[in-house]
Image (cartoon, grey):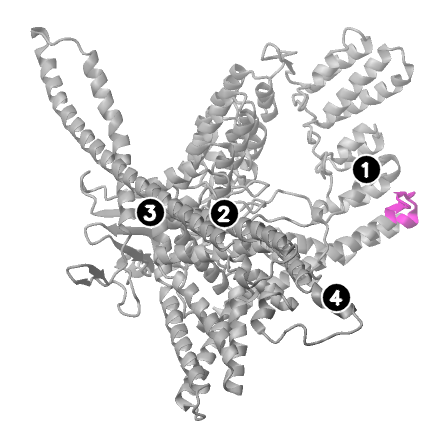
């Protein structure tokens, strides 16, 4: 394994080196070629010296090396993409220089002769307009260049080559002739010479084999452009007659309004070509196309042109009948697959039929056009013929179809047709549902974003339907779907055994397919790196480069990519669950049976570490407290075993924090971990110095708080709720106290200043008697705010309601100051803070069932995210591995066995060895069924797959993990609702049919017998519906009772709070 990874790394390094070499060669040769043919950005005059220099450059061996690199790199991504056929000059990035030469062929003709001959670039199509040299020659009316192409390069030059607008050289000349005739009719004599040149070049092209029956994208036929001016110009008329004679075939004339194609010289023979069939399709002359198609001969030499010119055009024009006719006649050649030899022995070579299509390059994009034209029958026709997965999934078909359906929201018919195509694609197993669009949105993202819930539900029923996939905005399908949709989908994931009757609910089956992340692709053994892997590598390299540049505190907001979920940088099985827990709308899904069961299964696999941590923390707290008492006792002899145990407890805390730091890394910095570090330092000081009562006291308080937090993490809803209340109330109290701190500070200053004014007066007198004021009493100093520290403590104590007003001096205006303080501090501020605490507690109680689950989700997600980066492999093996790596996505609940939770362990495939009839030895892996096992409720006491039950009569203890009864009842209620929804239409239809039936008479006694039998079935169904309604009413009453109990509890709490407030006010009034 390590050797193969090393080889792959070496191969990747070799590829990087070759990419770098290719880029350098491209730049060097581009600069060299530009320096020869260009001078200051303009064309250099082709002198003998320049031509000799160009010849020497073209003989440079660097061209050969660059060509070898280009040919080698073409096949690097051939396993995952269908590369377009591009020329060497395009791949070598040299077309820019060639385009500058072709823009002025009159000057650069000597250069072009050498370059075209050397690279055989007679048909080089320059991006982006795809004009070839022959197109440049006729546009510039360069007779010398055109004669050279038609005569010296006759075998290589294609006179009917078309550019991006589907124009041939003949079509360009005819359009130019039409423009010149318009200028001539406007009495402009400067175009007469141009007309003669155009006529000569048209004659040369016709003599070289140019075809008039080729139309452009604007539906302009070359012959029609000439025919327009026959009646206005005699020369044109004579020229057209010569062209008709030179063509030697019938020339097509199209009528767009009539949707028909006619011929100018019908007596001439008709030359049936793929371009002529295209003309029929462009003009929507379906009848003529079907008539001539049967006479068209298709061979292996022209089948590629048939696909590109005829089949693609028929799909674009939405002519379904024509497409079906083409496939029926020539489908065997169009969708021909590659036949590969197989077998080790060369004497016994067998032929194997693969799924790769021979004409995959020409078929590329055909299925996309069929989908966007919204013709389901054509899509089905192609899907039945195409077996090449690369051809089928070269484009994100489903994503594009959904986007176009959304754009067609104002055209209902087109929208429904596109949704029908999308619905068909969504159920096909050979269409990749994860193929994203340019924004990274998968079909599931788009279906939920655009509100196509039926398509989304269909996609989620597929095998790979992970709901945690992120687009480029780091958004998942959960961000686009609402609570109602996800609730209904999760309900559909609850099933029962189909072999059982409707009343039997012994086994509930939970489908967790949507929570299973996709496994990372393994690197191929042959060293072939996929395009996705290369893209990922480039992204990682970019991230590393940005990281090396350093972190800047002040950044530009426009250059910073905002990510909604920062924790999603590492994808784990709990990432999606955490997103649900943090969503205000979706967090109610945590108590759904599917999500709740998955969380409990994940928690029980990790809970033994929580119990162990709790146990060791309790032991450390007790031992260290005992050691502190023993150290500070009157006996100077310290017990050595206690000191050793306290040292071991300190070591346990150190090891625990070191492991957390190793796991959590940057996420380690929290308030609890900061307290733990402080505990370690304090414990070390106490162990080294001996008795330190104050420090030991604070240590015990810190341990007690930590122990309280650990108890709150136990799987008990009440404890978690109380701990959450404690945290929330403490945080809100601190926030409120900080808000009123300036007001309380002003009272501290006022009390200190007011009650110490006598000291200021005595300091100003000439004779001071230090015995006049008695400052020896500590209680008097505290009650009369003698020092600023006493004033602070006394004011804070009075804020809580402890006044001791009898010992306070109220002489002068001090009583007024005290009354102002009494109004603001104890009455307003304290009651406001109490009211906020009560409201927080009431809110927490409403979500008490979610608090415990959310806490578990946060801990599990944090643990799984940190385990990924653990550098030590042996340490990682000590923790549970991801659930779906060893288990399938089904969890069963045995309701007849105390709601036992059963998971299914995946078994390794068994290799069944066999011998083929030909005597060859082969091994075929045989899949085995997963093994169902139950989880232990406490791994420290029982192992998995246990079935023990401890019956103590008063209560029962199970050794296996069970599902909560309320959650199990909710799952059963979902099953009942699904059963009721499926039976209700069957009940309504017979009732409507029976109401519409006529009265039974003697003439139709046979029909009456059939209806009687039908009525018996109807009665049975009505009885089952009645039972279901009774059951649903009982559940409704139970829910109403629970709600009433909650309301009564809230009212009682409010009443108690009001009584407590009145009692406090009465006590304050009594003291005053």
Q: Nearer the viewer, residue 9 or 321?
A: 9
Q: Where does the image place residue 829, in percent across and percent down from the top left?
A: 55, 51
Q: Secondary structure at mark 2?
A: loop
Label located before the other in sequence (2 or 3): 2
Q: Secondary structure at mark 1?
A: helix
State the separation of the CA atoms marked 2 and 4: 77 Å
For label 2, the residue is 469
Q: Where does the image place residue 854, in percent across and percent down from the top left?
A: 43, 53
State the separation of the CA atoms marked 2 and 1: 49 Å
State the separation of the CA atoms marked 1 and 4: 105 Å
State the separation of the CA atoms marked 2 and 3: 23 Å
| Left or right placement of residue 622 versus residue 1042 in this view | right
For label 1, the residue is 102
Label located before the other in sequence (1 or 4): 1
Q: On residue 761, which mark appears?
A: 4
For label 3, the residue is 593
Per the rendered image, the range of residues in magenta is 36-50
Count of labels shown? 4
Disc 3 vs disc 1: which is toward the camera?
A: 3
Disc 2 vs disc 4: which is toward the camera?
A: 4
* Residue count near mark 1 (Cα–Cα under 10 Å), binned few <14, some 14–19, many ≥20: many
Q: Where does the image place residue 250, in percent across and percent down from the top left?
A: 63, 16
Q: Nearer the viewer, residue 794 or 1055?
A: 794
| Left or right placement of residue 652 versus residue 113 in this view | left
Q: Is residue 59 magenta?
A: no
Cβ–Cβ under 8 Å for marks 2 and 3: no
Disc 1 vs disc 4: which is toward the camera?
A: 4
Q: Using the image, determine if residue 381 lies above or below residue 272.
A: below
């Amino acid at each position: 394994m390590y050797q193969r990874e090393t080889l792959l790394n070496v191969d990747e390094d070799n590829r990087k080196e070759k990419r770098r070499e290719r880029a350098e060669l491209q730049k060097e040769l581009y600069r060299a070629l530009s320096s020869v043919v260009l001078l200051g950005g303009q064309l250099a005059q082709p002198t003998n010296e320049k031509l000799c220099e160009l010849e020497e450059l073209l003989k440079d061996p660097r061209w050969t090396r660059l060509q070898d690199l280009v040919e080698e790199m073409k096949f690097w991504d051939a396993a995952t993409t269908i590369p377009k056929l591009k020329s060497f000059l395009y791949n070598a990035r040299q077309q820019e220089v060639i385009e500058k030469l072709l823009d002025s062929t009159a000057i650069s003709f000597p250069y072009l002769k050498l370059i075209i001959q050397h690279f055989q670039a007679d048909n080089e199509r320059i991006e982006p307009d795809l004009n070839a040299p022959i197109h440049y020659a006729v546009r510039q009316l360069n007779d010398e260049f055109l004669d050279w192409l038609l005569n010296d390069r006759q075998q290589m030059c294609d006179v009917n080559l078309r550019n991006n607008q589907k124009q041939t050289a003949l079509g360009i000349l005819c359009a130019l002739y039409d423009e010149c005739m318009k200028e001539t009719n406007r009495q402009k004599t400067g175009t007469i010479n141009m007309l003669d040149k155009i006529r000569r070049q048209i004659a040369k092209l016709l003599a070289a084999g140019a075809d008039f029956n080729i139309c452009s994208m604007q539906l302009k036929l070359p012959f029609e452009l000439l025919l327009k001016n026959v009646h206005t110009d005699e020369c044109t008329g004579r020229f057209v007659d010569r062209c008709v004679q030179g063509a030697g075939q019938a020339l097509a004339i199209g009528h767009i309004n009539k949707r028909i194609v006619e011929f100018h010289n019908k007596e001439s023979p008709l030359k049936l070509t793929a371009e002529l069939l295209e003309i029929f399709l462009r003009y929507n002359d379906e009848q003529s196309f079907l008539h001539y198609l049967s006479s068209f001969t298709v061979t292996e030499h022209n089948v590629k042109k048939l696909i590109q010119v005829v089949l693609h055009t028929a799909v674009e024009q939405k002519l379904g009948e024509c497409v079906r006719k083409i496939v029926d006649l020539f489908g065997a050649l169009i969708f021909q697959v590659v036949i590969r030899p197989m077998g080790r022995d060369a004497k016994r070579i067998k032929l194997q039929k693969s799924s790769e299509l021979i004409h995959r390059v020409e078929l590329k994009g055909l299925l996309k056009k069929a989908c966007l034209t919204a013709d389901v029958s054509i899509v089905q026709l192609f899907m039945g013929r195409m077996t090449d997965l690369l051809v089928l999934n070269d484009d994100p078909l489903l994503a594009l179809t959904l986007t176009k359906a959304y754009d067609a929201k104002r055209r209902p018919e087109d929208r429904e047709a596109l949704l029908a195509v999308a619905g068909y694609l969504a159920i096909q197993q050979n269409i990749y549902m994860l193929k994203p669009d340019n924004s990274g949105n998968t079909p599931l993202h788009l279906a939920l974003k655009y509100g196509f819930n039926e398509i989304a539900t269909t996609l989620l029923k597929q095998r790979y339907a992970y709901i945690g996939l992120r687009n480029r905005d780091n958004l998942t399908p959960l961000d686009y779907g609402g609570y109602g949709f996800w609730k209904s989908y999760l309900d559909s994931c609850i099933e029962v055994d189909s072999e059982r009757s409707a009343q039997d609910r012994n086994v509930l089956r939970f489908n967790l397919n949507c929570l299973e992340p996709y496994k990372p692709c393994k690197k191929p053994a042959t060293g072939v790196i996929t395009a996705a892997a290369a893209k990922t590598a480039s992204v990682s390299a970019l991230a590393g480069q940005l990281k090396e540049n350093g972190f800047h505190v002040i950044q530009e907001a426009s250059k910073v990519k905002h990510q909604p979920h920062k924790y999603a940088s590492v994808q784990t099985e709990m990432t999606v669950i955490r997103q649900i827990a943090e969503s205000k709308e979706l967090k109610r899904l945590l108590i759904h049976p599917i999500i709740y069961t998955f969380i409990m299964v994940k928690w029980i696999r990790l809970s033994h570490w929580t119990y162990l941590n709790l146990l060791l923390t309790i032991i450390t707290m007790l031992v260290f407290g005992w050691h502190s008492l023993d150290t500070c006792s009157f006996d100077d002899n310290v017990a050595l075993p206690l000191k050793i145990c306290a040292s071991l407890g300190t070591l346990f805390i150190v090891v625990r924090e070191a492991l957390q730091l190793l796991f959590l890394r940057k996420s380690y910095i929290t308030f609890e971990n900061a307290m733990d570090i402080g505990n370690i330092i304090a414990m070390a000081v106490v162990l080294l110095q001996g008795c330190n009562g104050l420090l030991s006291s604070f240590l015990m308080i810190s341990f007690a708080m930590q122990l309280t937090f650990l108890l709150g993490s136990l799987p008990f809803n009440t404890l978690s709720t109380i701990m959450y209340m404690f945290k929330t109330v403490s945080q809100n109290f601190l926030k409120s106290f900080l808000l009123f701190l300036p007001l309380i500070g002003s009272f501290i200053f006022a009390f200190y200043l007011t009650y110490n004014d006598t000291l200021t007066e005595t300091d100003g007198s000439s004779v001071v008697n230090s015995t006049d004021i008695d400052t020896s009493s500590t209680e008097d100093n505290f009650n009369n705010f003698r020092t600023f520290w006493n004033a602070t403590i006394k004011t804070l104590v009075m804020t809580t309601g402890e006044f001791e007003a009898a010992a306070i001096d109220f002489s002068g205006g001090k009583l007024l100051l005290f009354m102002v303080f009494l109004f603001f501090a104890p009455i307003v501020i304290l009651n406001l803070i109490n009211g906020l605490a009560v409201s927080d507690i009431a809110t927490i109680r409403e979500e008490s069932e979610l608090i415990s689950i959310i806490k578990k989700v946060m801990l599990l997600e944090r643990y799984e995210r940190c385990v990924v980066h653990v550098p030590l492999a042996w340490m990682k093996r000590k923790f549970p591995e991801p659930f779906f790596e060893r288990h399938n996505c089904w969890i069963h609940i045995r309701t007849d066995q105390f709601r036992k939770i059963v998971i299914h362990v995946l078994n390794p495939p068994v290799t069944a060895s066999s011998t083929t009839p030909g005597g060859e030895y082969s091994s075929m892996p045989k899949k085995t069924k997963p093994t169902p096992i139950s989880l232990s409720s406490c791994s420290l006491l029982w192992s998995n797959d246990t079935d023990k039950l401890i019956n103590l009569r008063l209560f029962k203890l199970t050794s296996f993990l069970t599902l909560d009864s309320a959650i199990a009842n909710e799952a059963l209620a979902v099953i009942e609702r699904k059963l009721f929804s499926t039976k209700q239409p069957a009940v309504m239809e017979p009732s409507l049919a029976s109401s519409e039936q006529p009265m039974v008479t003697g003439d139709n006694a046979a029909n009456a017998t059939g209806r009687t039998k039908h009525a018996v079935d109807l009665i049975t169904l009505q009885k089952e519906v009645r039972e279901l309604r009774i059951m649903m009413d009982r559940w409704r009453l139970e829910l109403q009772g629970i709600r009433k109990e909650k309301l009564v509890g809230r009212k009682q709490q409010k009443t108690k709070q009001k009584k407590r407030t009145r009692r406090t006010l009465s006590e304050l009034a009594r003291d005053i």
